[in-house]
Image: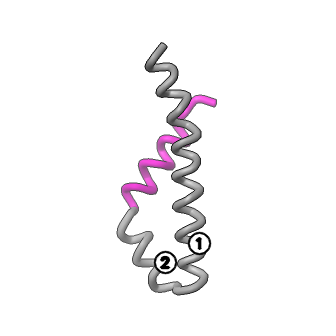
């Protein structure tokens, strides 16, 4: 039961994190394109992890 709760909590948290990152990077990219590129260069593994979690998470 605890694992199920954790799993169901992980989805919205992951989505929130993903959206937050997306919004942050987008706004930074619009304001300062170079800074946006730096951000996406710095956190590729984080993006990959979040994307993998979103894709692998059963709906």
Going from the N terminus, do you reach mark 1 or mark 2 first? 1
> How was the colour assigned to the protein in this rendering?
one colour
Q: Position of residue 22 (x, y in %)?
A: 57, 63
Bounds of the magenta segment:
44-59
Residue 39 relative to residue 25: left or right: left
**Residue under pointer 1:** 26
Residue 12 relative to residue 37: left or right: right
Circle 1/circle 2 CB separation < 8 Å: yes
Residue at coordinates 48% horizontally, 77% vertically from top-left? Answer: 36
Task: From this view, report whether residue 52 is shown above or below residue 44.
Answer: above
Task: From this view, report whether residue 18 is shown above or below residue 53.
Answer: below
The answer to if 51 sits in the magenta stretch is yes
**Residue under pointer 2:** 36
Q: Position of residue 29 (x, y in %)?
A: 55, 79
- Label 2 CA crowd tier, 10 Å (few <14, some 14–19, many 20+): some
Q: 10 and 43: which one is in front?
A: 10
Residue at coordinates 45% horizontally, 17% vertically from top-left? Answer: 2
Residue at coordinates 40% horizontally, 55% vertically from top-left? Answer: 46
């Amino acid at each position: 039961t605890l694992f199920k709760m954790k799993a169901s909590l992980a989805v919205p948290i992951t989505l929130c994190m993903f959206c937050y990152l997306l919004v942050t990077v987008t706004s930074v990219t619009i304001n300062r394109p170079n800074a946006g590129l730096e951000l996406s260069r710095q956190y590729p593994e984080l993006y990959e992890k979040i994307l993998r979690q979103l894709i692998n998470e059963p709906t």
